[in-house]
Image (cartoon, rainbow, N blue to C red):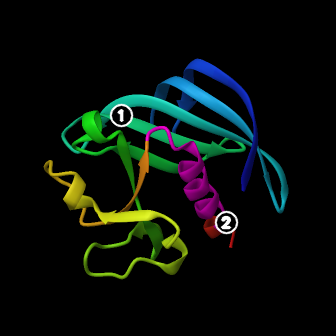
Amino acid sequence: MHIIGLAGVRTKFEYQWPKEKETFDHVVEYKALAKDGKHSVWVGFCKRPVYGKDRIRVVVWIDGHPHAEFFGADDFDKSGEVLSEIKVPGRRGERICRYPDEPIPERYNMFNVVGLPVRVSDKGVHNAWAVVANIADHKTMIMLAALRRLERSR
């Protein structure tokens, strides 16, 4: 999926999840092109409690469907880095790819990947592999969302 242009910026965007509504402070809208045609891609930003504290949160939607979610690393204020747990097929949908017990799936080789507990140390942190991106690197976040979209369509 290739970004072909900026479509706009929204503020105070609300998204209805199955159990709750979430308000995003800003959403950057892109036009994108993939083998299957043109797409609308949104990258939304807010804060919410994740692993014991309020963290920056980023969600990437393709054609109105969320495909990737990121949250701030413990050192986000210095590094600007956000993380997204790697998902693999499980018995009931998707499950996290376990760090360090499972190998990183080959399809994630293009991404910077770390063990989540290396970057987040709060209570309840999953032992998962995670993709790392800078908060300003929308291209990487969109590529992860596009990969997950392809995985789910198979």
Three-letter code, disc 2? Leu
Residue at (47, 29) in percent of width and height: 22
Q: Is residue 76 above or below residue 107?
A: above
How far from the left and from the top, in percent, is residue 146?
Answer: 64, 57
Residue 146 colored magenta? yes
Label 2 element class: helix
Residue 142 colored magenta? yes
Three-letter code, disc 1? Ile
In terms of depth relative to the viewer, which is nearer, 138 or 55? 138
How far from the left and from the top, in percent, is residue 41?
Answer: 68, 41
Q: Residue tagged by mark 1?
A: 56
How far from the left and from the top, in percent, is residue 136?
Answer: 49, 38
Residue at (61, 30) in percent of width and height: 28
Density class for disc 2 (Cα within 10 Å; few <14, some 14-19, many ≥20) is few
* Region of the chain picked out in magenta, as a range: 135-150
- Please tell me in which quadrant of the rendered image residue 117 appears: bottom left
